[in-house]
Amino acid sequence: MISGRLNLREQIDKKRKELQAERKSYEKKYLVRYKQPKASIKKSSNLKHDDDLGRLNFRKHAVTKRREYLAERKEYEKEYLARYNKQQKAKPKKKAASSNLYKPEEPKPKRDMKKERTEYEKKYLARYKQPKAKPEKKNN
């Protein structure tokens, strides 16, 4: 003690050195554990049942069927794409205006109502008009 003060510097340094030494030893142990090859995970034998428990298990069957189905679908998609690409190359691109979907009808000629009316009136009058009386010729 100098001049009535406590000097804690020595204790603090000592404690810090102890902590650093402890950390170094821990880090060495950790690195040894980390660098070791990890053991592969083995499935427990209780997952593999050979004995019949009286239950139906469709899991294996469903998984294999699904794989077959997906493989078959993938194969079909390849074939379809090949066909589709061939068709695209074979067809020249047509203009949208030459579409066969819409063909406008030819416009009908305008009706001449006056002509139709006069023709109808003539026919009507011809039906109901009485013939004129012709003067008889006298035979001398």
Image: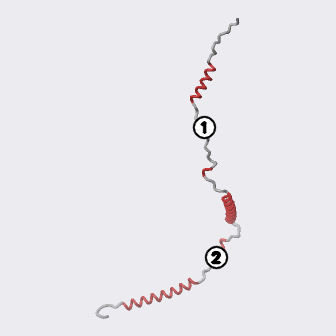
Q: CA distance from mark 2 to mark 1?
A: 87 Å
Residue that badge 1 annotates? 108
Picture coordinates of residue 37 (x, y %)?
Answer: 60, 82
Screen quadrant of the N terminus = bottom left
Tell me: 7 left or right of 92.
Answer: left
- SS under mark 1: loop
List x then y, in percent, for residue 69: 68, 62
Question: Looking at the picture, how far across and down is residue 100, in whole percent?
Answer: 64, 48
> Badge 2: how crowded within 10 Å, few (<14), some, or many (20+)?
few
- Give the residue drawn at x 56%, y 83%: 34
Q: Amino acid at mark 2?
A: Lys
Q: Which of 14 and 45 lies nearest the eye of the viewer?
A: 14
Look at 68% across and 70% down and name the residue there.
Answer: 49
Residue at 66% x, 74% y is 45
**Which secondary structure lies at badge 2?**
loop
Query: In x, y percent, where is residue 51?
Result: 71, 69
Asked where in the image residue 113 lies, by quadrant, the reply is: top right
Q: Residue furthest top?
A: 140
The residue where tag 2 is placed is 42
Label 1 Cα neighbours within 10 Å, binned few <14 / some 14-19 / many ≥20? few
Q: Which mark is residue 26?
A: none
Residue 54 visible in image = no
Name the residue type under label 1. Lys
Looking at the rendered image, the quarter that the C terminus falls into is top right
Ranked by sequence position, the earlier of labels 2 and 1 is 2
Q: Residue furthest left?
A: 3
Vertical arrangement, residue 14 with respect to residue 114, above or below: below
